[in-house]
Image: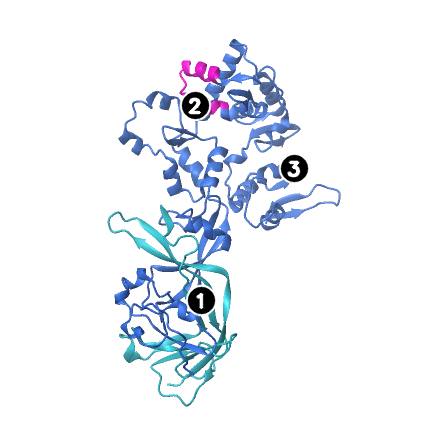
Amino acid sequence: MQIQVKCNCGEQNCPEWAIVELQGVIEPQPAFQDRLQHLEIGQLCRPSSQTYTFTVGYHELTGSKVPLKKPLLVLKKIRHADDEKVELEVIGIIRQRILFKTRPKALISRPQPVVKERVSAPGSLVPS
Amino acid sequence: MEMVAEQPKSACRGAEAVLNLQPTSSVSIAYHSLFGPHDDLILLELDEKLLPDVLHHRVTLRGQPDEDAVLCTMSKTYAVKFVGTSNSVLLIPPSEQLVLCGNTQDCDEKDRVEKLVAPVIKVAPGVMELVEVAPRIDRLKMLLSENPYRFDDALMSEELDEMEKNNTRLYSWSDLNDRVQASNDELRSGLQALSAVEIDGYWRIVDENYMDGILNMLLHNLVLNDWSLNGLNETEVIGVLQSDGFPCEIAQHCLQVYGSKTDDGVWKLDEKQVCVHFARAILRGGKMRMDNFMVEWMRKIPEGMQASYDMLEGEVLTDKIGIETWVYAFDVSSLPSAPAERFSMLFRERPKWEWNDLQPYIRDLSVPGLSSEGLLLKYTRRTQPTPDAEPVFSAR
């Protein structure tokens, strides 16, 4: 069986996707599980040229834009209905990510968040 | 804190808002209207230098449904491994991602308001990574051995109809691509190493007895027609072999296996190939005493050729039984190509090997990233009885 890897982008034109990466799990409140569309997760800010902050619920994360050692291709698996052939199409490329790997800072004076971030490391603040 | 940068023109905001975020600006990260698991979206880590091959459609994934897939460029094979992450990797597509949005009208109406939004389409569980591997070429020999080309094939080829061909497990180049996890170049090398030949669009290995027959016919005619060993006329040779009943492709194949082209249409017989052929033919009957074998061998070799025992490196092994030395066929090309299996078979044959004996049976092994010393270190135990004795290799 062979799966052809196709690309309709053209040599220099692969659309660039973005990645925001953080340690931990993003959790919307149970009430919102069914209507996630357009729901804001958080605010990504760039206070200076080197630093980025990502505020999710009560947590503020600090990070930076990091180039990837090796680019990532975004592939879409396409199954043709008529002839059952499977193809992989390159629909994008990722060369850098906004990476957050510090412990979150707790922002105490905020209202109840709809979406919050749960840090997987023990001993962190997770307001209920 | 929320100072808005200049707005992009498109209706759907996206990756650009994140990638081009200016200092002192911010962007809202939100769930995409089509947020979901999207198992059909895969992230593949790729070396920069492989990028042109992918973008120019020179890369395929190969493998049967029950196998681990490999990714093949024109010349190399890579295992594809999924590496998971415990991080949350938020994947944000660029704004004009029609493949996802369907059409721009599906995209969020809200984005037309003055706010930058980067929608997350998926949280990626991990990434596919590539590891260069040796091609899984043993499958090729197995497939082609199902149906070696024999004397009766030559007679039948005109009568064999389409349906019969489908039933008799014959493999074309594209059939082999589907079934063998190797790049095109590696597949071609594999076919060459097997002395395979393409007949009627199918790749075949030719049965040993058949090759014996055609080589003997060629040598017989060489003597009869007073041809030169080093100056065989291609057209003449093929013509004579054809009139003796051999198909043109097989006659051509005979020249390619046992000879080398010296000029346009001119071939010379390869001494080593011919001598090795006869040694193999003699030992097909089983073990022989060394002196008997040498006598037989010298008898069979064509006039004008010289045989020497070192031609049989990687083809035969010797056994000392009492004071006598016996010789038997042990062909490196019949051994598995994967190192673990190869060493296992070698140590099954003989628990201890000296370097000179071992070397011809492992020099064709190639594992990306592992040198021959590395291979020995990994798969053998090296002992040296005394400082000036030959090192001996045994299983780990």
Residue A121: horizontal and vertical position, in percent? 47, 77
The residue lying toward the viewer, choosing from B99 and A5, is B99
- Occupied quadrant, residue B272: top right
CA gap, disc 1 to disc 3? 48 Å
- Counting from the top left corner in percent of width and height, residue B236 is at 47, 14
Q: Whole-percent x and y of residue A33? A: 29, 75
Q: Nearer the viewer, residue B203 or B324?
A: B203
Point 57% across, 42% down: residue: B347
Nearest the viewer among B73 and B148 is B73
Do dots 1 and 3 share one subunit? yes
Residue extent of the magenta highlight: B235-255
Q: Check the residue under mark 3 and report the chain it is in.
A: B
- Where A52 sits versus A78, above or below? below
Q: Colour of chain B?
A: blue
- Judging by the rendered image, the residue that carries numbered circle 1 is B85
* Magenta span includes B246: yes
Mark number displayed over residue B250: 2
Secondary structure of the residue carrying numbered label 3: helix
Chain identifier for the cyan-coloured part of the image: A
Q: Nearer the viewer, mark 1 or mark 3?
A: 1
Q: Residue furthest bottom?
A: A109
Q: Does B51 appear above or below B257? A: below
